[in-house]
Amino acid sequence: MKKYINYINLLSTKLPLNFHSLYSFYFLNCIANIFFSIMCGTLGILSISLLPFVLIADIIYFIFKIIIHIKYKNKMNNTGSVITTALNELSIKLLKKDEHYLLKHNITKNYLIIHHQTSLKEFIFDFVRTYNYNYFTIDSQRGYVVCESHKRRSLGDIFLISRKHYPNCTIEEVLKILIKLYVNGDINGSYCTDICKYVFYNWDKSVHRNADCQVEYESDLKFSDYINYYNNK
C-alpha cells in the first residue's frame, strides 16, 4: 500500500507542467493519500489516534505542491518574457545586417536549391548534418564569405540561412527546431569561446555537448533554460 502511494507521488512529479488537469491530479493524489490513510487506520495498520495528524499532513502536502507549482509556473512565465525579448532583439539585429544568407557549393560553386516539399525542420537537420560540410556561406547583399564549410554554426547563422528558402520563418521557430534536434540527440551544441556564441554541429564534428552554458543573446540564461522553457511550454 505504501509502495502504491509512493508511485502516485512519483507519477505526479513526472507530469508535464502544461498538463491541463494537473491541479485536479494533485487533488486526487491528496484524496488517494487520505483514503489509504483511513484504510490503514480501519485495518489497524495505523493507530486511530494518529489518523487526524496524517490527514492534516496529506492536506498540507497537497497545498504545498500547488504553491510550488504556481511559483514554478510564474518563474517560467518570467523566463518566457526574457526569452521572447532576447529573440526579438536578436532577430532585428540580424535582419538589419542581411535578409538572408546563401549557401554556395565548395566545388561546383552552385547555390543550394531546396525543394518546396522539404519542411523547415528537415532543412535545418540536413544543413547541420550535410550541407554545412559541402557549402560555404555567402552574404546575400555584399557577396562576401560569411563562413567557410565545416564550421560550427550559431542560431543567428542558421536563422539567416533558413530565411533564404523559408522567408517567413521566425528565429523562435528555428530555435525550437534546434532544441528538439539537440534533445533528441540528432545534433550537438556547446559554447564556442572563439566567437563567444552557442553553436550547433554534427556528431562527426565533435561528440562534445553541453547545454549548461550561456547563450550570446541573453547572458543571464543558459541554453538549458531555453530547453526547459520550450519543453514545458
Image (spheres, helix red, strand yellow):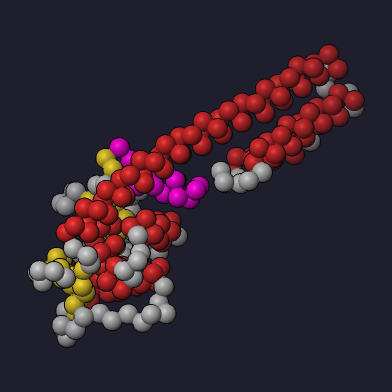
13 sits left or right of 136 in the view: right
Q: Quadrant of residue 44?
A: top right
Q: Quadrant of residue 36?
A: top right
Residue pushed farthest top?
49
Front residue of this view, candidates 162 and 208: 162
Question: Does residue 182 show up?
Answer: no
How many circles with numbers are drawn on the protein? Answer: 0
Kindly identify the residue that appears in the image at 74 percent across and 37 percent down.
28
**Where does the magenta region start and end?**
220-233
- Quadrant where the N terminus is found in the figure: top right
Main secondary-structure element of the magenta-colored stretch: helix
Q: Residue 112 at x, y = what percent?
A: 25, 79
Q: Residue 168 at x, y = what percent?
A: 35, 66
Front residue of this view, candidates 81 and 49: 81
- 147 in the magenta segment: no
Front residue of this view, candidates 40 and 80: 80
Kindly identify the residue that appears in the image at 82 percent across and 31 percent down.
35
- 229 in the magenta segment: yes
Front residue of this view, candidates 27 and 133: 27
Q: Residue 51 at x, y = what percent?
A: 81, 19
Residue 83, relative to residue 52: is it above or below? Answer: below
Q: Residue 53 at x, y = what percent?
A: 75, 16
181 sits left or right of 161 in the view: right
Kindly identify the residue that appears in the image at 10 percent across and 69 percent down.
142
Residue 166, relative to residue 81: is it above or below? Answer: below
Question: Does residue 102 show up?
Answer: yes
Kindly identify the residue that appears in the image at 66 percent across and 37 percent down.
23
172 sits left or right of 154 in the view: right
